[in-house]
Image (cartoon, rainbow, N blue to C red):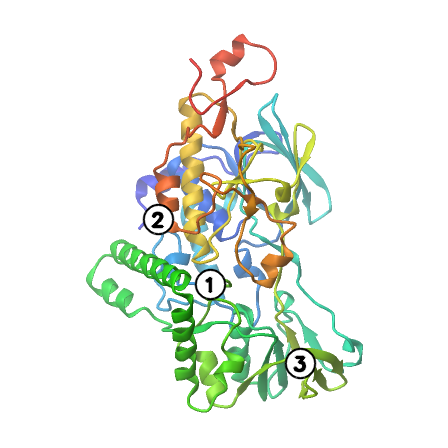
Amino acid sequence: MVSEAYLIRVATMTATPPDDALLDVLIVGAGLSGIGAARQLQQRCPGKRYAILEAREAMGGTWDLFRYPGIRSDSDMYTLGYRFKPWKGAKAIADGPSILAYIRETAEEAGITPHIRFGHKVVSAAWDSSEACWTVEAERSADGCRLRLRARFLYVCAGYYSYAEGHRPAFAGEEAFRGRIVHPQFWDESLDYAGKRVVVIGSGATAVTLVPAMARSAAHVTMLQRSPTYIVARPGEDAIARKLRRLLPDGLAYGLTRWKNVLLGMFFYQLARRKPEQTRQRLVAMAAGQLGPGFDVDTHFTPRYKPWDQRVCLVPDGDLFREIRDGRATVVTDTIERFTEDGILLASGKALPADIVVMATGLKLNMLGDIALTVDGQRRLPAESMAYKGMMLNDVPNMVLAFGYTNASWTLKADLTAEYVCRLLRYMDRHRHRIAVPRSDPALRAVPFLSFTSGYVQRAAGVLPRQGDRRPWRVYQNYIMDMLTIRHGRIADGVLQFDAPRAAQMRHAGQPDLVGGEVRP
C-alpha cells in the first residue's frame, strides 16, 4: 500500500525538466529496470531531478516489445518482480501482458510516468570532466529532430539486446518457400496459424514458449533444433506462496516467498555446477518422466553441455511436454539443408512440411543501447572496458548500467544496482563530490563477462565488457554475495575514486583532482 506521505512527496516533485535544465540523473530506458530505478531513486534520494528517455512509444521494454503467442517470463515473478512491490498475480510464471501491467502500475503509483520522454532514442553521451556532467544527445522519433540534455549522472537501463534486429540466420532456398517466415521479435499479430503446419526453429526459452501456445490451434507444430536444451517442468502457481498469502500480509508473504525462491535457485545452481553429471541425469530423467515410455530422450532432451553452461528452460505445468505427449507437437533434432516450396529439407534427408516457419533463433546482443560513448573527447567501447561490480566501466565517470543475472531473475541484480546508485549519490552528496570513477589495476587478468556457452553470448564476445579475476571486478552471478557487497559494502573501497570536495575545487583552478576512495583532508 502506498503511504499518503509518499504520494504527497511524489506529487510535489518536479516532472520532466526542460531541455536546458541540468539533471541530477538521466535514466535511459523505461523497461523493468528503468522503472524500478526511478522508483528507488524517488524513494531513497527524494528531490533529485531526473528524467527517463525511452526510444519506443511505450514503457515496458521487453514486455511491450515481444507479442508472440504465449509470451511469458522464464523466471518466477517472486524474484522477477521488484523487491518493493509484491507480485499479487496467481501465476508464478506469468504471461507478458500481466508483467507489462505490473510495470505500468508501478510507474503510475509512484508518479514516474510524467518523467518519461517517449520516442527519444539516445544516440550519444559525452562526459566532460571540467564540468563534471554528461551531455546526452537523443533523436526524437516523431520528427527526427535531435535534442541535448545535460546530467550529472547517467544510468543506462537499456537492456542487453538490440530492439531493432534479432539474430536471423539465412538459409538456402528461403526465396522458394511459399509459406510465411516470421521472427518472434517482430511478430505479426494478424498472423493466422489456426489449422496450419508450423515449424519453430530453435530450442531456447522463446521456442519452448511458442510451441505449446501455437499447438493449441495449429494443425501441428514441430520444434526443429540443432541440439537439445535442458527443459524442466515447474508448477505454474507457487503453492507455498498461495498459502502464505492467506496467512500473512502481502508484503511479508511476498518477501518470504522471494527469499525461498532465491535460496532454492542458488542451491540448485550450485548443485548443478558441483555435480554436473548427477544433475544431468536427474534433469533428463525428469524430462523422460514427463514424456512417457518409448520417447527418444537421448536424442531430443539430452544436451551435449553441462547444466547451466546455458540457461535452463522452464515450462509451466509441463505444457510443452503435454503437447508432445498428446501428439500436437513434435521435436526434431537435425540441421537444415535448405528450404523448399512447401517446407524444409533436413540434412538427414527428411522433409518437414510447413505453412509457417518461426525463426526463434535468438537475440542480437548489444551494450548501452548502442550509445556512442565518449569521455573527455575519447571514444569508449564497452568491449574494451572492464566492469566494476558488474555495473560500472573502468575510467568512465558517473555512469552505471543495469545488467541482471543469467542464472537467476534479471530484477534481483537490477534492484541491487538501483540501491547502489542511490547509496553512491547520497555518499557523493555528503562528501560534496561531483565525480565517481572506478580505476582498474593493470595487474588484473581479464576474463569474459559471461561464462555461458549459449550462441547469443558467444556471438557477443566482441560487444560485452570484460570482468576481472577478483573483486570488485569479478561478476559472481550470486545474489547473496552481491547483496553483501552492493547493499552493505563500503562505497569508498579504494577502487572507486572521487574528485576533491567542492570547497577544495573552488581554491584550485583547472580539472577536478581525483583522489582515492577517501575524502582528501
Point out which mark residue 200 bears: none
60 displayed left or right of 374:
left
Amino acid at dot 2: Ile
Q: How many marks?
A: 3
Q: Nearer the viewer, mark 2 or mark 1?
A: 1
Can you give x and y, in whole percent of width and height, for residue 145 in the image? Answer: 73, 42
User: Does residue 199 appear in the picture of this structure?
Assistant: yes
Counting residues from the N terminus, which is met first, the one under dot 2 or under dot 1? 1
Point out which mark residue 480 bears: 2
Q: CA distance from mark 3 to mark 2?
A: 45 Å
Residue 361 sits above or below residue 134 on the image: below
The residue to which callout 1 is attached is 308
The residue to which callout 3 is attached is 356
Counting residues from the N terminus, which is met first, the one under dot 3 or under dot 2? 3
Residue at image location 69% in from the left, 78% down from the top: 336
Marks 3 and 2 close (CB-CB < 8 Å): no
Residue at image location 43% in from the left, 63% down from the top: 75
Can you give x and y, in whole percent of width and height, for residue 328 in the image? Answer: 52, 88
Marks 2 and 1 close (CB-CB < 8 Å): no
